[in-house]
Amino acid sequence: AQSVAQPEDQVNVAEGNPLTVKCTYSVSGNPYLFWYVQYPNRGLQFLLKYITGDNLVKGSYGFEAEFNKSQTSFHLKKPSALVSDSALYFCAVRDGGSWGKLQFGAGTQVVVTP
Amino acid sequence: NAGVTQTPKFQVLKTGQSMTLQCAQDMNHNSMYWYRQDPGMGLRLIYYSASEGTTDKGEVPNGYNVSRLNKREFSLRLESAAPSQTSVYFCASSPSGTDNQPQHFGDGTRLSIL
């Protein structure tokens, strides 16, 4: 079985400050990890993924994520947040050794204030 | 450059009515998915289609049926709508379920059952 936990329902950050959105996962095989962002009344948009290789993954809109195997974490980061980063963020995992059903976290609402 | 297109965008039904949600993708993807999104619960997989001609149950299939009409189209049917099916429904597609590519999402259908 696979599962994802996003421990924070909401993250508040001032514009220009660093942004971190936390994600931990559980999967029996090798994890394929994804971050998605959702803006109001829109579908999910892919930000970045970790499959293998370098633990620091860079993605769209200046976001990056760090894969930590020992802590089973995949936290999303942005060095300097923008008001336009305010959105709902989802972490997702699937077992790389099996067919691709994704398990999503509950989501974290990010609010960036000017 | 449409990607995944869902119709309708909004719908209000009465308990017991039936309806079909439509989804089409123009990316030549093999795999398609139906999710529902409820507050605080992330996205939960209803049904999926690994390839044209196949469909399988996901996490929450009760009360729903699906049809993979062809490679492009994957519809979701509610035979007798219930208030518990009030949700936002998302269709997604991916090249296949065994690769490491992300799923692409439509903008959703917002469904209310009275």
Image: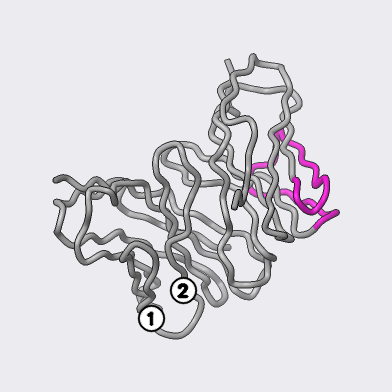
- Report which residue position mark 2 lands on: A50
From this view, report whether residue B70 is shown above or below residue B65. Answer: below
- Report which residue position mark 1 lands on: A55
Residue at 30% across, 59% down:
A21
In the rendered structure, are the residues bearing label 2 and label 1 in contact, judged by CB atoms less than 8 Å apart? yes
Label 1 crowd bin: few (<14), some (14–19), many (20+), radius 10 Å: some
Residue B81 rendering spot, x and y as whole percentages: 68, 23
* Mark earlier in primary sequence (2, 1): 2
Give a yes or no on whether discs 2 and 1 share a subunit.
Answer: yes
Which residues, given as a range, are shown in magenta? B52-73
Residue at 51% across, 76% down:
A51
Label 2 crowd bin: few (<14), some (14–19), many (20+), radius 10 Å: many
In the visual, does A61 lie left or right of B52?
left
Local secondary structure at mark 2? strand
Front residue of A53/B40: it is: A53
Front residue of B46/B77: it is: B77
Task: Identify residue type, mark 1.
Answer: Asn
What secondary structure is the magenta-colored segment mainly?
loop
